[in-house]
Image (spheres, helix red, strand yellow):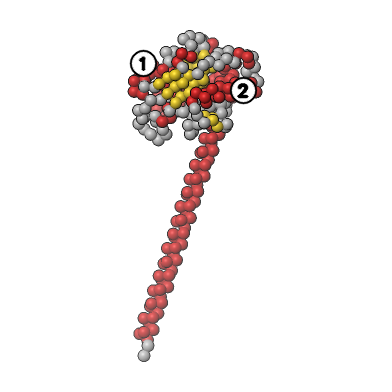
Amino acid sequence: MKVTIGGPLKLAFRPWVEGLENVPAEGAAILASNHLSFSDSFFLPAVLDRKVTFIAKAEYFTTPGVKGRMTAAFFKGVGQLPVDRSGARGAGEAAIKSGIDVLERGELFGIYPEGTRSPDGRLYRGKPGGLARVALATGAPVLPVAMIDTEKIQPPGKVMPKLMRPGIRIGKPLDFSRYQGMEHDRFVLRAVTDEVMYEIMKLSGQEYVDMYATAMKRQLSEAAKAEKEAEKAAKAALARAEKEQAEKEKQEKQEQEKQEQEKQERRRTEP
């Protein structure tokens, strides 16, 4: 990936980086990043000398068809770990265990605490499961990461990417050793996650929204559906009104023609 994609990516987009010195030259560490674009998982590894293993949504590994198989082969080839975001606990546990295995090998583990891409460029509440549990189970330091402007390179619906310089800010490592052995305490998991999200917010300058991005996406989807249904209902009402108006005009015309015929008939019968 670094040779075939990373090099051309850096040459074409020239991403700027701050805080690269915070990434350890060796040993385990967690890179916890905001998530603005599909390309986040390409730009961050491209600017690092070390390999980063990310958690990726399970759909990248299970989509059928030729394109699906090619996507799955790519993500497996670069060592990405599938995670089921549908709520299947077994799959989530397997992903956490895989993340722990990566760190126990002394490697870099990348994760998006929001759980999905931001729907509007704002920073959303972090999910306390994966990040905090992996950090507390391994004792690995957490490096907050802010991706800047990556969502502007290829917005939804755009086929060709826009050539512009995205940015990456890497914060100083956060030590959560004070919570060691408390990875099953939900209040501790929440506290760890919120601390990381606060550091990401400071690095990114994003507006923070105290709700999950998945909930916001659901709201936006429902709002779009409601708007579409309202538009459909409005069109149907307009069509009915136009039909009624046309019928009314037809009846008026028929009545006028009838009256005209009666007038002509009276003229013919008059002495």
Residue 183 visible in image = yes
Who's the residue at 55% across and 24% down the image?
198
Q: Amino acid at mark 1?
A: Val
Who's the residue at 54% across and 35% down the image?
216
- Position of 85 with respect to 11 (left or right) is right
- 263 versus 42 height, above or below: below
Which one is closest to the eye, mark 2 or mark 1? 2
Tell me where residue 138 appears, x and y as whole percent: 57, 13
Q: Secondary structure at mark 2?
A: helix
What is the CA distance from the residue labelled 2 to the residue labelled 1?
Answer: 39 Å
Q: Residues within 10 Å of mark 1 (few under 14, many from 20)?
A: few
Q: Secondary structure at mark 1?
A: helix
- Position of 152 with respect to 86 (left or right) is left
Judge by depth and name the residue closer to the eye, 215 or 173.
173
Tell me where residue 197 appears, x and y as whole percent: 55, 24
Dot placed on the residue nearer the N-terminal end, 2 or 1: 1
Q: Quadrant of the C terminus?
A: bottom left
Q: Quadrant of the N terminus?
A: top left
Q: Image quarter for residue 125?
A: top right
Q: Residues within 10 Å of mark 2 (few under 14, many from 20)?
A: few
Q: Amino acid at mark 2?
A: Ala
Tell me where residue 184 appears, x and y as whole percent: 64, 19
Residue 83 visible in image = no
Who's the residue at 52% across and 24% down the image?
202
| Residue located beneath label 1 in the image | 3
Q: Are marks 2 and 1 in contact (CB under 8 Å)?
A: no
Numbered circle sitting on residue 191: 2
Who's the residue at 50% across and 48% down the image?
230
